[in-house]
Amino acid sequence: MDKFTTLTGIAAPMPLVNIDTDMIIPKQFLKTIQRSGLGKNLFDEMRYTQDGAEIPGFVLNQPAYRKAEVIVAGDNFGCGSSREHAPWALLDFGIRCVISTSFADIFYNNCFKNGILPIILPQEAVDVLMEDAKKGANARMTVDLEAQTVTSSDGQSFAFTVDPFRKHCLLNGLDDIGLSLEKAASIDTFEAKAKTLRPWV
């Protein structure tokens, strides 16, 4: 998984509340176990008509936000069913950070495991960042994980909290497999010793 250190990018405003995982990636796209390729179906029912044409009014279809890397969202983002395809789709589109006042627990945890930083901020701070995101492609936010700050395009900075272990994993690009591989030498030593002590196993 890619490291997350500092991100400066376009933020898409998405003020809807209760954006659930079926809105993020509808159920018909859950057949794959591949993490790539889902970005084109991110928010599928909001982005496209039934015949596959883009809906111009949807934020990610607007020219200013086609390369957004941050979403500033309404309350309770990622609620609904516990599908890991939701962060997969966000990441495949290019989203590395979602900012909201609250997240559904399972979605929140899945974000960290897939290299996305979910940031919880008070409503007042989200309101400021939402208005900043509405300025379009020229208004770029900066998310600094080491400093734990989000800075708007005009320099307003907001501090956020993050679990130290999750912060360590994101800064170093460590998913569950990566964490295990960090202990590879110790695992090899244990297995070699176990083979000597219990050769019949």
Image (tube, rainbow, N blue to C red):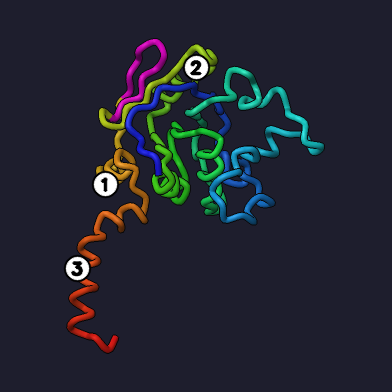
Q: Nearer the viewer, mark 2 or mark 3?
A: 3
- Percent across and percent down for residue 9 are 45, 22
Q: CA distance from mark 2 to mark 3?
A: 55 Å
Q: Which residues are magenta?
A: 148-158
Of mark 1 and mark 2, the one earlier in the sequence is: 2
- x, y percentage for residue 109? 41, 48
**Mark-to-mark CA distance, 1 and 3:** 25 Å
Q: Which picture quadrant has residue 189?
A: bottom left
In this rendering, the answer to whether 151 lies above or below 91 is: above
- Residue 62, which numbered label? none
Amino acid beneath label 3: Thr
Three-letter code for the amino acid on which mark 1 is drawn: Phe
The residue labelled by disc 1 is 165
- Crowd tier of the residue under label 2, counting other residues whose Cα lies within 10 Å: few below 14, some 14–19, many 20 or above: few
Nearest the eye: 107 or 31:
31
| Image quarter (top left, top right, bottom left or bottom right) of the C terminus | bottom left
Residue 162 relative to residue 17: left or right: left
Which element is circle 3 on? Answer: helix
Give x and y (percent) for residue 81.
56, 53
Q: Secondary structure at mark 2?
A: helix
Q: Residue at x 24, y 66 (%)?
A: 187
Disc 1 from disc 2: Cα separation = 32 Å
Quick check: marks 2 and 3 in contact, CB under 8 Å?
Answer: no
**The disc labelled 2 sits on which kind of residue?**
Glu
Q: Secondary structure at mark 1?
A: helix
